[in-house]
Amino acid sequence: MAIDRLTIVSKNNQENEVMPKNVIGSVMVLGGGIAGMQSALDLADSGYYVYLVEKGPSIGGVMARLDKTFPTNDCAM
Amino acid sequence: MAEWEPKIVSFLCNWCSYGAADLAGVGRMQYPSNIRVIRIPCTGRMSPKFFLAALKEGADAVWVSG
Amino acid sequence: MQLLKKPRYVDESKCIACGLCAEKCPKKVTDTYNAGLKNRKAIYVEYDQAVPLKYAINPKECIYLTKGKCGNCKKVCPTGAVDYDQKEEVVTLNVGAVVLSPGFKPFDPSRFDNYQYTKYKNVVTSLEYERILSASGPTMGHLTRISDHKEPKKIAWLQCIGSRDINRCDNGHCSAVCCMYAVKEAVISKEHEGDHLDCAIFYMDMRTPGKDFEEYYVNARDKKGVRFVRSRIHTITEVGDTGDLEVRYADEFGEIQVEVFNMIVLSIGLEADPDTVKLANKLGIDLTRSQFCNTSSFEPVNTSREGIYVCGAFQGPKDIPESIVDASAAATAAGASLTEARGTQTKQAEVVPELNVRGDRPRIGVFVCSCGTNIAGVVDVAAVKAYAEKLPYVEFAANNLFSCSQDTQNKMTEIIKEKNLNRVVVAACTPKTHEGLFQETLLAAGLNKYLFEMANIRNHNAWVHKEAPELATQKAKDLVRMAVTKVALFEPLEEAELQLNQTALVIGGGISGITTARNFAAQGFETHIVEKEARLGGQALSLFKTTTGENVQEKLSALVDEVTQNDKIHVHLNASIEGVEGFVGNFKTTVNAGGKSQTIDHGVAVVATGATPFATKEYAYGTDPRIITSLDLDKKLIAGDSALKTMNSAVFIQCVGSREKDRQYCSRVCCTHSIDNALELKKQNPDMNVYILYRDIRTYGEREYIYKEARKEGVIFIRYSVDNKPVVAVKNGSLTVTVMDHVLRRPLEIETDLLTLATAIIPNDNEKLAQFFKLPLNANGFFVERHAKLGPSEFATDGVFLCGLAHYPKPIPESIGHAQAATSRAVTLLARKTIHTNGQIAKVDPMLCSSCMVCVSVCPYSAPSLAKEGRFAGKAEINPVLCKGCGLCVASCRSGAIRHNGFDNSQIFSQIFSLSQVA
């Protein structure tokens, strides 16, 4: 990708971070391709706040570069 | 008298052709301005009466796309 | 988590994507979106449909940011969005879970000389070829060679570039998607150019094990005339200065052949992105041999670190529907771990009470947008505004510089209130992107959001008629007039609110059904499982180990115990479904369990009815105890049958009942399953001769490693052709299999102690269930999902979901992922608690209805039905929850009894009639 807009610098660390006492109702999705977008949509629709993180300037990933998809030959876009 | 120009009425499906016409704009594809678009929710909505009405109102062509 | 947010150098809240900046930008940069086949500017959007549709500056290329000069884009930007001073910032986010979906990296063939990718111009990658085929690509969808713009007459695809090859590229895995995309590209090329275009695919094994894939492949070969050449490529050389390419290859008999093509497409594989590998190391999660994310068969989207989940191609090479399945599965897994915090971080919008304007004389406000210079640069917006003011019922008209900006929105809200407007027209960009925004403006002013219409004077007008400003102004007036005429006829529409029953019904108690129920319960939803047999477990009860070596029976019984003991889950055994009533949110299903009937109220249903092994009559099955099926062999392995250890020889025959005339599809799991079992036999007795008779080995993804391992361990693979199948004979107590060896070109007779038939997986009889829920079945009897790519875990019928083998054959990890995905999709519905119907739907006038049933038969969503009771019993009624507002019934109704809110006959006619009233 031309511009790396968002990259992970470091993790905030330690196991106790992963299992906090108070569960936080938000999820970070890393990567805005077709999988990341679907996951983010499902999580948001299920009642979680989602941070969708993408390194490029727009979401869509590789699928957006495809012409058509089989077996239906639908336009990939 | 100016050269004759056709009047075209087009019925475009909201989910595909209407969006495609939008994209033609985004891509700045130039075309003659003779078309008037009527957005419909699906080409399934098309009724023969719409064609006839458009022709009666002076349209030279009716284009349905979806 | 700490993130580094890199600057875009364009303020997203100000950029209106007008493109003036890119027009004036002097710096040309390679367009990575178009695989480097054309140029774009240093300030750019990736592609026309990009989300967000906001420009960004490439700081490595921008003349201002690199040399401090130029600044053109800032000068021309009408909204002042360009900001060269944006800095990198570190963002810290506290989250409850992380989902990794970083994707893959397309294999780069320039690293290796033998593909001649850098040397010859007409050798392109498959991703470049996608752009060449695309209407928005560098050739505008005309199939030509980029080098000399000649139309190719012969194109070759070379498979497994960067896959299944540890000698040259170190990628031992199969990339799983290339066979299918190569077939697709070849078929689409022929559709572009006609039958005279020669398309040849050079391959090792054709791997088309997905749903409808084999049919597509056979169709490409037999009907479309795509040539498939089983071969090994030797060298590629250019023919003089023609740009044509000579391919030297060894055919399946090992003989060297030569053929010349105009163009070569390299079917490049998928590999893990080194950046992702770094990220994984930073996060401390385990990777596989090919550096994809390591997951277990029973938790396919959990990484080795708690709280971090994975989906998409980073979990292993996979195609779009599998990525979509995974994505939903990861959402379920992440969601289940955070159930107690559901809804705590989301925000609710404030609701303004709605004014009652029903029956009032229309008072229309028209806002004509300049969109900076986008519209105003072509259309005389002042003239359009002046024209609008004179139209009937128009009380107010104004010009806006940018209608979509927040301050203009606030101003519009004030004007609506101040002038008592009760209908609004915005003449601007397009309703596809901005209708929702302006409807919000109406809501904020206390107006029903359906009292709104847009006139598309940018995308359909100013942008496409740049050279004819007068005609464009004329057209803008016409479009505004049409919108005003239509909006005058609008009435406020209601969105009914329905309570959603929070209970789920899962049909089928196999591994998919159990997983689904378990996930529903974990997210706090009451669940019923209906299983036709006397115990839970389904086909998994006969399975020995997964490909990753996990013991199926141990895991399965733990799962069954968990589900049985969970008080949110109610298991109904020996049960069948006798009837279904209702619709999404409010189903009533009658279940008969062990002779007793009961009605279950539920909001959603998941179909997980599984599949069954095909009972073959071929290969003397049933005549000799030594001839068994794959599942029989698993049962022997589960039982620890000691006779297996003493055998001298074992033979597997693949594709028994699959990939044939009557059953075209590939059963997906059998290649891997037989190889797993062959290796197990070799492990129990290394001296045993093990033969696998196959047609194509389809160990997709990292399963390829076990194929390699099997060859290393001495398992003998012999390919047979479907026209010349192996022959099985039982004579004088000895069991022999005779097969034509393709390489030696002579028959080979194998005496064996065990013959395992890899029989097809066939669907259960789903007819009745399909009718109950109005679900479609395909020709093979599998259920048809909402969308082959984007809706693999749900049906077009709202509130009904699908997973497991009832959809298509798949191994355990994929069934579990699919089950998690179905749960996720269902939970997105249940979490809403209520359903809001769309206002723009069809409605029956029962006084006019003649009960002809046409609406009932044409509706793709089963929304219309005949009323069973009440004053209008026998007349059609439309369920507003199921209606999608397509209008098919409205157009089909012979009695004119169906009205269409928002697109009613009177409203569409008003637009047509206003056409002739030239401004």
Image (cartoon, helix red, strand yellow):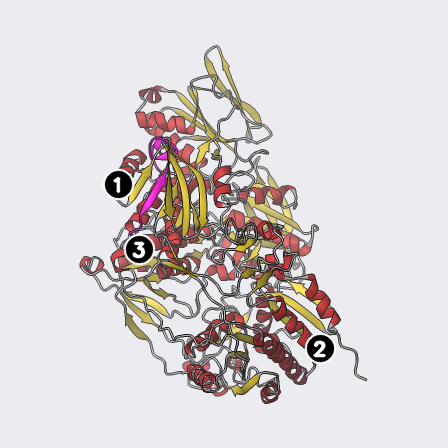
Crowdedness near tag 1: few (<14), some (14–19) or many (≥20) residues, C-alpha within 10 Å: some
Mark 3 element type: helix
Q: Which mark lies nearer to you, 1 or 3?
A: 1
Principal secondary structure, stretch drawn in magenta? loop
- Residue type indicated by callout 2: Ser
Q: Nearer the viewer, mark 3 or mark 2?
A: 2
Can you give x and y, in whole percent of width and height, for residue C315 in the image? 37, 51
The quadrant in which residue C192 appears is bottom right
Magenta stretch in the rendered image: C524-547
Q: Which residue is mark 2?
A: C916
Image height of C896 relative to C480, above or below: above
**Which chain's residue wears label 2?**
C
Q: Nearer the viewer, residue C506 or C171?
A: C506
The crowding category of the residue bearing disc 2, from other C-alpha atoms within 10 Å (few below 14, some 14 to 19, many at least 20), is: some
* Amino acid type of the residue that numbered disc 3 sits on in the rendered structure: Ala
Question: Where is residue C579 shown, x and y percent of the image?
Answer: 45, 40
Q: Nearer the viewer, residue C759 or C487?
A: C487
Which of the numbered marks, if any, corresponds to residue C334? 3
Q: Earlier in the sequence, mark 1 or mark 3?
A: 3
Q: Earlier in the sequence, mark 3 or mark 2?
A: 3
Seen at 57% across and 65% down, the residue is B14
Q: Are marks 1 and 3 in contact (CB under 8 Å)?
A: no
Tell me if residue C542 is in the magenta stretch: yes
Q: Do marks 3 and 2 both belong to one polypeptide chain?
A: yes
| Residue indicated by mark 1 | C562
Considering the image in quadrants, where does the C terminus of chain C appear? bottom right
